[in-house]
Amino acid sequence: MSVEQDDLEFNPFYLALQNQFCAKFAYAQDHCYLVCIPQTASMVGVTITAKFVETHILKPSPLFQDNYISTDRLGSKTVEVEGNEIHLLEGFENQSNVKIVSEELCYNKKYKPYKMLIIERPLEGEVKGRRGSAGLSDEFLKPRTTFVENVKFLNLFPECRFQLLNLDKSIQQFNHNYLMVKGYLSAAAQKLKKIWQDNLEAIIAANNYVKLQADSRLEEVIAIATESYLIGGVHTKVFKAVCEECQSQDAVLTTKSEQLQGITGKQLGVNSQLDCPLPTSVVELARLDGIICPHEKIICLKTTLDNITEEVTLHTRDNLAPGDSPPCLTSDDLIPLLVLVISQAKCHHLAANLMYLESFRWASSKNDNLGYSLVTFKAAIEYMLREDFSPFTSSENKVKKEMSIQELMAASKLTSDESSSGTETAFSNNEFDGVTQSLQREFNNISKMMQESLNIQRESRHQSGSQKTRNKGSHKTGHHQTVPGVVSKSDPKASKSSKLGDFLLALQNDVLDSTYGKQE
């Protein structure tokens, strides 16, 4: 019989050593004792007591090599380890052999080695069943993600229909009768948690597969599905109240997100080697408001963090110099990057979502890291609420997407001066490819157009001043003569230009290839 890869994670005896009998397990580790762990398949119906634990934690015999003695007060049992089998020698009712499925070499706090043996069955005690008799695959024992999937999962067990009908009645009563009062969300959370606990116990007691399943994974899946079933039924009412509770915080976060537009991670103190665009994470977080199931919400947070870590890792690997070691992504860099993702994701109720998960999520797996994701997002929110990003809002600190007119004219003057002096400039055709040369030609055309526009405006103001002077002279002499035109008939282009304003006049005389704005 082969041991499953994740057997220890769900093994009831191993979990008991880490929880109820942690003192005995710690003592065994410190003294490098041999720990025998019956595989999960053989633990169905077996009661784990202190005596059972002492039988499976063995210390070396002082008399014979490869012999071990139980750690009870009298050392009443003796075994011999030979090859891939354990021979039961003394103190056992049935002196038989137990097969060793696998061996794990571990280290204690002092870095001294000790062994854990995964054995086919307990050293003593009747084996009443084994995992697999329920016919449930590992895929079946993984938690469902969405609300719809959890509803379908609970309806797979016909023996639980009566319990689901009672749960539906509780949901209906809460939606119709319970009054959500601002500032008292904890009371609503406690009431819904009590409804969840009562119905969960009833569903588990009625389920025929729980009794045949050695590990606790099925109970965890049912707990998450029941929570999703309940919270999904009251989501509209509850989430609306949570959003009202966190309205001020979400408004502040919206303002902070606007201030962070165009800000880079480097400006927030992120290591320049780790600063990179994070579009995938933004898309994942943007859908958070539309999720109903609490388990799916927190998985969305975890996926966002995973995406950030993955994209930063790929960025550092692609830009790593030969021989250098990649920098480590710590929380000091992760939180500012997460803040930038939050500012771009346009999640309007992020503070409400975090409070929703803290107050209305009770079922969790013992082996996931979803709690870390929630704590990290809370830290990012606190960072956004605490820090002042107004110094970054000035144009000098933001990423510039275009040049100002003054900068454009200054660059044009610098280019013309350098070209006339014969020095090699940054825009030399010998150093740039065809695309860059094309951009440079457009740059020169724009500069020329702006210079001509300024010359035309100056001429127009000069001509306007001359016209006023002549008009003033005609009034003094008393003659009512027509004011002569300031443009001669021999200059038709100037005649047309005199009828245009400054803006259209500049467009009329541009030197670009485009024809928009020209007047004929």
Image: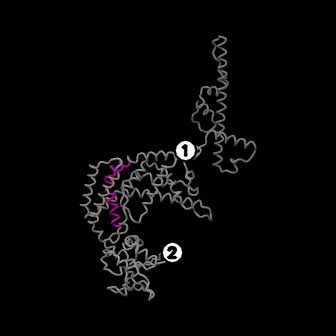
Front residue (pair 345, 423): 345
Disc 1 element: helix
Q: Quadrant of the C terminus?
A: top right
Amino acid type at circle 1 is Thr
Is 200 situated left or right of 7 in this image?
Answer: left
Residue that lies at the very extreme toward the bottom in this rendered image: 63
Label drawn at residue 238:
none
**Left or right for 205, reference 415:** left
Q: What residue is pinned by disc 1?
A: 393
Residue corresponding to mark 2:
111
Residue under the point 48% across and 49% down: 385
Q: Is residue 51 above or below residue 196?
A: below
Q: Is residue 73 above or below residue 136?
A: below
Identified by mark 2, the residue type is Tyr
Q: CA distance from mark 2 to mark 1?
A: 53 Å
Range shown magenta? 217-243
Residue sitting nearer the eye, 45 or 517 = 45
